[in-house]
Image (tube, coloured by chain):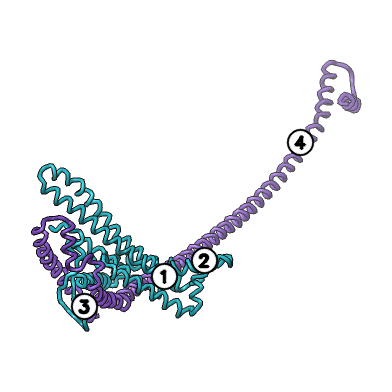
Amino acid sequence: MASENTSTTDTEGTASHGAEGTATHGEASHGEGMAPASGEMHTSTEAAGHGGGEAGFPPFDSSTFPSQLVWLAITFGLFYYLMSKVVLPRIAQTLEQRHDRIASDLAEAERLKGETDEAIASYEQSLAEARQRANDIAKTTRERVQQSIDAERAEAEAGLAERAAEAEKHIAEVKAKALGEVDAIATDTAEALISALGGGKVTKAELSKAVSEARG
Amino acid sequence: MSNDPIHQFHINKIVPLEVGGLDLSFTNSSLFMVATVAATTGFLMLATSGRGMVPTKLQSIAELAYEFVAGMLRDAAGSHGLKFFPLVFSLFMFILVGNLFGMFPYFFTITSHLIVTAALALLVFGTVLAVGFMRHGLGFLKLFVPSGVPGWLLPLVVAIEVISFLSRPLSHSVRLFANMLAGHITLKVFTGFVVSLSSLGVLGIAGAVLPLALAVGLTALEFLVAFLQAYVFAMLTCMYINDALHPGGH
């Protein structure tokens, strides 16, 4: 870790140094370029001729090729080495760790969700059981109450029927007794009427016979 | 201000150096190669030093670049291609940053020299050849024999395939080189117009508005080109690597 840090500062150091060097160098070469340009005025053919005096069109100036190739090999080689050995593994590791972390977090979330679902299911099951039990209790209570009501009603009805029968019997007796006395009253009344009317003597037997005949 | 649009491509020695008769001087080109590598490496090192689970802004940029190039390579060459990821990533970043450095005034554009782009293209070409023959032996030559071509047409098709294969490093390198060169020359010419016209008095200043506007637009376009050419170079590299890995895959 420490060595990496120092190498980072090193490269930064060269970078800033490089930028400074460039600026000053750019100024310098620009200054040199000014002299012939101002001397010969600004015709581009002359300017090109000035360049041509050195080596022609710079990208095709083969005298600079070895230097460019060597420095390209050095810099790009170093760049490739640093990328493949330090920077890219670092980024790959970070990305992989993040990927793993996200995957494990997702798995954990999945597991917790499963637990929640389980808890909900068991809660609902016990809720259903409780409801069932409540229903059962209500049903048995209802049945028991119904039974006792039925029993009481049957008892009450039985009592009532008995009393009704007694009452009917009593009524029938009273009625029979009353009816039995009707004949005697009629006979007495008839006897009293006959004697009051002075219609002679009538025997009791004749009277009751006549009453019963009249009653049909 | 020198109006010569070619002046910006001159290579100047900073530290003269000669080894075995070869001029290996440290030049402005070398300086910008070093600067490109140093800036890019420094940035990526700094950005990734935290290795945060939640990335910082800088780290996001580094990861974005990583996944951009990795996605490009995976799409073009499949997961086998990821073995060449460091190469493609290095090429992409090196060219991208080199191109973007070239957008600064007075800065030297390393990719505006054919020898640099040619060297990079040949590096890719050599890698493709080496990998192709190492993995498939002579089977790599199947690359030149597309399947489903009638026999009598085959010699012609194979000849065309061979020629197009051999011209790859040429087009690969010239595309980048020519884009950067032409873009910088155009920019320089238009800004040169602005300077020379505005020295001609009031009328000239009025006339300089158009090239100035063009120069502004071109600058934006050149930033796009700087990115696009790095992308194209890396993309073609991915496709060539795909050929090396799957020569029969036409």
In the rendered image, which residue does mark 4 sit on?
Answer: A174
Distance (Cα) linking label 1 and label 4: 143 Å
Looking at the image, residue A213 sits to the left or right of residue A4; the answer is right
- Quick one: label 3, few (<14), some, or many (20+) residues within 10 Å? many
Marks 2 and 4 belong to one chain: no
**Viewer-side label of 3, 2:** 2
Amino acid type of the residue that numbered disc 1 sits on in the rendered structure: Leu
Which mark identifies residue B21? none
Q: Quadrant of the N terminus of chain A?
A: bottom left
Marks 1 and 3 belong to one chain: yes
In the rendered image, which residue does mark 3 sit on?
Answer: B24
Q: Which chain is purple?
A: A
Numbered disc 1: secondary structure? helix
Distance (Cα) linking label 2 and label 1: 15 Å
Mark count: 4
Question: Quarter-wise, where is residue B189 in the image?
Answer: bottom left
- Quick one: label 2, few (<14), some, or many (20+) residues within 10 Å? few
Marks 1 and 4 belong to one chain: no
- The residue sitting at 12% across, 57% down in the picture is B1
| Mark before the other along the chain sequence, 1 or 3 | 3
Looking at the image, residue B188 sits to the left or right of residue A158; the answer is left
Residue B54 coordinates in the image, percent (x, y): 31, 67
Chain letter of disc 4 in the image: A
In the rendered image, which residue does mark 1 sit on?
Answer: B166
Question: Quarter-wise, where is residue A38 in the image?
Answer: bottom left
Chain letter of disc 1 in the image: B
Looking at the image, residue A4 sits to the left or right of residue B199; the answer is right
Chain letter of disc 3 in the image: B
Chain letter of disc 2 in the image: B
Amino acid type of the residue that numbered disc 2 sits on in the rendered structure: Leu
Q: Which chain is cyan?
A: B
Marks 2 and 1 belong to one chain: yes
